Image (spheres, rainbow, N blue to C red):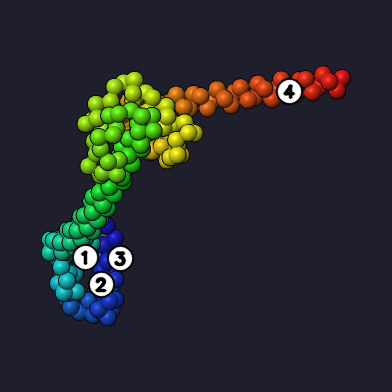
């Protein structure tokens, strides 16, 4: 604790000289000067006398906040904390609102993908002349593939057709598969078979190019 520094600072802030302090305390200036410089060696009685002369509390002299000051600081800290909590609550509310919007958007998007998937499946079934597909209008938004009772063999044919270049909406079907919204096993299996076929075609094309390159090299030799 810098008691002497506090005494001097308070005295000077009040415009008092050491002589003024000595007069207030009923002593000589030299005696007061020694008291002001004793710092922590001051007795409690001497600190109280100096505090009375300066018209301040002992707490101010020794540099410790009073209970009122502590309560004030605690109140200010509490207010700041409450303000931060309010800000946090506002941010959370905004995030919840955004999450709700994103969920609604995802559900809406999924519904569109499912509808298009159903329509593409029925169109493929009709093109393959699978009779079950003729019982409904493929543009009906309320269609449900489960109502058509396609066999596993029929679904396999439909899937392979949808992922063939013969299908008019081939690229749309690939996009739907890669969206992840459709999880029907027969559809995913058909997509995987298509990917394997494309990979095999690429590998075969590379082999052909390599063989052609070898023959060209031999002919040049």
Depth check: 177 or 122 in front?
122
Depth check: 216 or 34 in front?
216
Q: Is residue 29 above or below residue 122?
A: below
Residue 71 seen in the current view: yes
> Which of marks 3 and 2 precedes in the sequence?
3
Percent x, y for residue 23? 20, 79
Q: Which residue is mark 1?
A: 61
**Which mark is nearer the camera, 4 or 3?**
4
Give the Cα separation between the discs numbered 4 and 3: 97 Å
Within 10 Å of disc 2 (Cα), the crowding (few <14, some 14-19, many 20+) is some
Identity of the residue drawn at 29% across and 60% down: 2
Give the Cα separation between the discs numbered 2 and 1: 8 Å
| In this picture, residue 165 sits left or right of residue 5 | right
> Pointers 1 and 4 in contact (CB under 8 A)?
no
Within 10 Å of disc 1 (Cα), the crowding (few <14, some 14-19, many 20+) is many
> Which of marks 4 and 2 precedes in the sequence?
2
Helix, strand or loop status at disc 2: helix
Q: Which residue is mark 4?
A: 212
Helix, strand or loop status at disc 3: helix
Q: Which residue is mark 2?
A: 10
Helix, strand or loop status at disc 1: helix
């Amino acid at each position: 604790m810098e008691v002497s520094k506090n005494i001097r600072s308070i005295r000077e802030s009040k415009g008092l000289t050491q002589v003024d302090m000595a007069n207030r305390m009923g002593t000589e200036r030299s005696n007061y000067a020694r008291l002001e410089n004793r710092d922590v060696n001051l007795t409690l009685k001497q600190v109280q006398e100096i505090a009375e002369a300066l018209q301040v509390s002992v707490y101010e002299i020794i540099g410790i906040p009073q209970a009122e000051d502590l309560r004030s600081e605690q109140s200010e800290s509490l207010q700041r904390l409450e303000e931060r909590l309010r800000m946090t609550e506002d941010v959370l509310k905004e995030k919840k609102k955004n999450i709700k919007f994103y969920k609604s958007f995802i559900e809406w998007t999924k519904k569109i993908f499912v509808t298009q998937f159903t329509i593409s499946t029925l169109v493929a079934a009709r093109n393959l002349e699978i009779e079950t597909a003729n019982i409904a209008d493929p543009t009906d938004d309320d269609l449900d593939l489960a109502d058509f009772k396609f066999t596993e063999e029929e679904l396999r044919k439909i899937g392979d057709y949808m992922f063939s270049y013969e299908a008019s909406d081939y690229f749309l079907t690939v996009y739907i598969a890669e969206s992840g919204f459709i999880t029907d096993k027969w559809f995913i299996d058909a997509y995987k078979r298509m990917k394997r076929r494309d990979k095999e075609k690429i590998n075969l094309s590379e082999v052909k190019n390599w063989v052609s390159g070898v023959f060209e090299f031999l002919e040049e030799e």
